[in-house]
Amino acid sequence: MEDAFVRSFESIRLADVPEVGGKNASLGEMTAALAGEGVRVPRGFATTASAFREFLAANALEAPMAAALARLRDGEADLDETGERLRSLILGAPLQPALAEAVRSAYRLLREPGERGDPPVAVRSSATAEDLPGASFAGQQESFLNVVGEEAVLDAVRRCFASLYTDRAISYREAMGFQHESVALSVGVQRMVRAESGASGVMFTLDPDTGFPRVVAISAAFGLGEPVVQGQVDPDCYLVFKPLLADPALRPILARERGTKLVKMVLEGGSRRTRLVPTTAEEQAAFVLSDDEILELGRAGARIEAHYGRPMDIEWAKDGETGQIHIVQARPETVHAGAGPTFLVHHLEERGTILAEGQAVGSAVAVGPACRVDGPEDLATFRAGSILVARETNPDWVPIMKKARALVTDRGGTTSHAAIVARELGLPAVVGTGDGTARIPDGATITLSCAEGETGRVYAGALAHRTEEIDLTSIPQTRTRILLNLADPASAFRWWRLPAQGVGLARMEFIISNMVRVHPMAIAHPERLSPGVRRAIDDLVAGYPDAEAYFVSRLGEGIGRIASVFHPHLTIVRLSDFKTSEYARLLGGAGFEEEEANPMLGFRGAARYGDPRYRDGFALECRAIRHVRETIGLANVAVMVPFCRTLDEADRVLATMAEFGLERGRAGLQVWVMCELPANVVLAEEFAARFDGFSIGSNDLTQLVLGVDRDNAALAALFDERDPAVARMIMTAIEGGHRKGIPVGICGQAPSDHPAFAQMLVEAGIDSLSLNPDSFVRVAHLVAAAEAAGGRRAPGGNAGSDVGSTSRPQAA
């Protein structure tokens, strides 16, 4: 099927963009190059740019169209009038006979062997200036679904031609500096994927908000894909870790977030018309994709990215009749592609009343007046520099969005039109708030924050904030390993560009509190719960096989997200270290925790894990660690035991862990211990003989050396890690660990807060400092200066970085 007017996808390559546009060139490239690698593209063909230009010439349309555009540029006509004039010229002209016959013939060839009747197809526009590396934009031209029959296909082709001159397309070309006369339109005609009875969505081959390049981010909803792109539905979201996808024994899924999915788009009867219908309660509670489908999409995304040699923005659809997943569009990702050696870190310095919450797009903070707009027809009412508040957006909203300081929507996910365009325009946005338009007063000053992880928040009033620019090329290399303390999986990807050598402290209790929200014993013993608590837990675990699978999956994936950031460098995960009062606040926790007079020194840390009051909950923690290491495949995860008071307690914890499948040394598993009690220091060599590393917890160690309650404000002046007694204990711990050949690090707050303290640690020969991310750059310079001034280096090799080794790591 080759002529001047029509080309089959099999014959098209990327070099054919001038003839078939970016969208069709990409579909052809994937059809030809990736069909044998698990990337399934629906069969189809494309009309050429030559066909479009000859259509204009055959109907003598160039002159009147040029005149209409000239009137727009001269200010003699507005955008609405110009667009209407151009579209009516095209819709009133017939397709030239040679083009019409070429389309008819190509359409007949799409019929499958033995298929009766005409095949249903999707007819999509592909402009010759769209989906280029520097010019990607969602939804400029029209698409038509479920088109059946030759005449209907011809009509859809002409309507696609006309859509080259929608108001939004004209406005976009004006903004991008493209000459209208130089842009032609190709039309792609593909076999229809029956997504109306299946599912569809979008995926990026990087994290779309942080640019973290090692994941595929997938959005999914039931039905046709337009509501996902337009932000009319809050989709499921999944993350897949690309470096481990090649191993068929692993299932490297880092996140499953169930969206509300309140509506889906379906076809109306057998027609081309679409409509939104409510989803069922079962659909809302279910995940759209199975694990196998998530991994299939992740592998397809990784193969497409590898073929193109750059991050990609991909649309996919699952056929409800065959269950097959198809790629229906792939274009270059444009927001993070040109990232330089600097990046901005935004900090919200204070908090206020929360008006709305949703998904954060970007990482910035914006302050300004809220301006609610109900539709693009209200452009004249929007105040430039305001924060746009809307139910949802579509391509017609772009003129308003360009004047906005930030964006809030009721509906949509991080791959919706609002999110995509906000990134392209450099606007922070909070999408999918549910009721932001109702809760945010029009005209009120608000602060929109995307600087707190995945959750974006809108606060009342103007809150203080600052922006820090980090020059990556200025961060010095150090002999002392510098790690990060990370607690929140939702914000972990923000820091991937820092040259950290791993994660020195990942707090399991934070992940349980924020992602799981249920007391582990409430999962293990539902028979001890009240009916109301059981119902609340049942709502949380919907979509999972059972409550235990929910706990293991959610906790494991939260740990996995943190461990993926600097993989294969070590990520040290501290086992849960809640106090009883904190455990009791978890869902279902009140019935499993006794009130203590001093929870700080009570039933916490290692004392809990083998005790009958928590043993079954600890078994779930161990299962989650095994899930990360063995199922996801992140074997760089090490375990750390907190608040271990005695040697007997250490032996019991190690035995209990081994009973639950976490045996020290097996499959390279390292088990560290927090060095945070005087007993750990006094018996440093004995503790070191049982563990693979020490991590000094300077907060608790200071509290217990000085006898100061660290939470007592009246004693705050006495609490100081730099006290000579504390400093001597720390140096003693470093010496004791090194005598036994294990690495010693510190994960407490002190090095992040006190430069002189960090310098003292380097001079004492500490192997690693684990810092809060916002102090990384400053402390790295201090460490480099201390090393240059004669700070000694501890003996040995590369502390614990060889995650595949079962031998004892040496101090670095």
Image: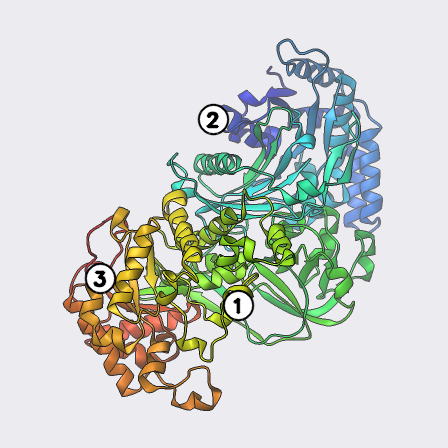
User: Residue 604 or 710: which is nearer the viewer?
Assistant: 604
Please name which of the two marks, 2 or 3, marks the residue nearer to the observer.
Answer: 3
Position of 262 with respect to 714 (left or right) is right
Question: At which x and y percent is residue 231?
Answer: 69, 48
Which amino acid type is shown beneath numbered disc 1? Ala
Q: Earlier in the sequence, mark 1 or mark 3?
A: 1
- The residue pinned by badge 2 equals 33
Q: What residue sits 23% from the left and 64% below the top?
A: 743
Please name which of the two marks, 1 or 2, marks the residue nearer to the observer.
Answer: 1
> Is 655 above or below relative to 186?
below
Q: Crowding at label 3, few (<14), some or many (≥20) Cα neighbours within 10 Å?
A: some
- The residue pinned by badge 3 equals 690
Question: At which x and y percent is residue 407?
Answer: 68, 59
Q: Give the Cα separation between the discs numbered 1 and 3.
A: 32 Å
Q: Earlier in the sequence, mark 1 or mark 2?
A: 2
Which element type, helix, strand or loop, lies under badge 1?
helix
Numbered label tally:
3
Q: Give the Cα separation between the discs numbered 1 and 2.
A: 57 Å
Which element type, helix, strand or loop, lies under badge 2?
helix
Q: Which mark is residue 584?
A: 1
Q: What residue sits 24% from the left and 71% below the top?
A: 766
Which amino acid type is shown beneath numbered disc 3? Arg
Which amino acid type is shown beneath numbered disc 2? Ala
Q: Quadrant of residue 403?
A: bottom right
